[in-house]
Image (cartoon, rainbow, N blue to C red):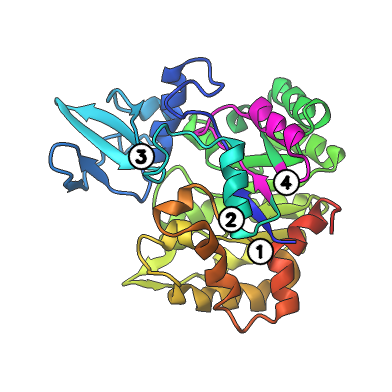
Amino acid sequence: MIADSHAHAFPPMGGPSGHSSVAEHMHYAQLTLMFHHQPARRVTDNVAIDEQMLVMPEEPSIKGLTNVNMRGGDYGKFTWTVDGDDFTKQYLPPALAELEAPPELMLAQMDYAGVDRAMLQTGHVYGRLNGYLADAVHRYPHRFWALAMVDEWRADDPVQIRELERAIRDLGLHALWFQSSGPRQHRRTEVLDDPVFHPFWDRVKDLGIPVFWFVTSAFPGVEPYLAELAAFGRWLRRYPDVPVVLTHGLLLSRFMEDGQVRIPEEAWRPLESPNVSAELLFPIFQGGVWDYPYKEARPVIREYYERMGADRLMWGSDMPNVERHCTYRQSLDYLRQYCDFIPPEDMAKICGGNLARLFGEA
């Protein structure tokens, strides 16, 4: 089985997408785009702009968003206006004219690339999609798993526990997606392992579901990210029996120096926990810096392999977003065709066996 740990399906991203309004949805788009590595471009001349326009730098939270009339554009772009000039970011590939990726599009891509199953991940930028993703799973149960989402910044509210229970028990979703920067982006001071959130995490443990952790920070730079990883490590020590997938793996952009990746030892430390698997997901982040077949990624992949072993690694693509940089098949082949230091039996685990085993289907 070839199984993708990280794919997406979503309704048109210029609409409410399950949020209470289009405006609420655009708040989350703006939060996502504020430090996103794709360049902002002025519409009139397509010139890349370095200036931070989407948030007050000292307040990278939903309260610090600037008033720029953020809106969904066309052909994969979001658009906003500053002083009468329109700007865009190419968040999705240009082929997504309506900012939409229905499950059937993902199925067509999977069939063409030879991928048997995929995990449909989520995120507030895509919308409140528990019902949408559950419908995809119910219609295509042998092709998709899907993740549930809650409001991370309100995880200490019993309402979020009930929503998680509904998503898992009633809707049939398979695991929880959780973004570590969510509380900080909503001006919470507690870190992800704070005792105030323990009742929520205790219920996750009782439900017996995996957690797909997106560990990132509200602020850019190395130190805020390392602080989130340290909190993640403490959380892992409290919940050693909860299966965890580190979505995106370690964020290499935080550790780039003079074009080289230098991952400090403290960043690897949480990945020593035996209940953690990591996604190998390089083209989506590094495809704008490195060319296919991403030979620069091989030393990092080798380090993952030597540190964690084949049983705790999972290939992911981040489709359809990854098509900003390469085709779906290339997002798989840079790994399975070019990393010859990984023997075939281990590559089979990484490219699907481990994900299937996580859900009892290996």
Which residues fall within the magenta stretch? 118-145
Mark in front: 3 vs 2: 2
Q: Please report whichever mark, 4 or 3, sits nearer to the chain's N-terminal start.
A: 3
From mark 1 to mark 3, how far is it between C-alphas?
28 Å
Furthest toward the top, the residue is: 20
The disc placed on residue 5 is none
Label 1, secondary structure: give it: helix
Read off the residue under disc 3.
34
Read off the residue under disc 2.
112
How crowded pointer 4 is (Cα within 10 Å; few <14, some 14-19, many 20+) is rated as some
How crowded pointer 3 is (Cα within 10 Å; few <14, some 14-19, many 20+) is rated as many
From mark 4 to mark 3, how far is it between C-alphas?
34 Å
Relative to residue 264, is residue 147 drawn left or right?
Answer: right
Q: Quadrant of the N terminus?
A: bottom right
Q: Please report whichever mark, 2 or 4, sits nearer to the chain's N-terminal start.
A: 2
Read off the residue under disc 4.
143
Q: Quadrant of the C terminus?
A: bottom right
Mark in front: 1 vs 4: 4
Q: Please report whichever mark, 1 or 4, sits nearer to the chain's N-terminal start.
A: 4
- Going by the numbered disc 3, the residue's amino acid type is Met
Mark in front: 1 vs 3: 3
Furthest toward the bottom, the residue is: 341
Read off the residue under disc 1.
271
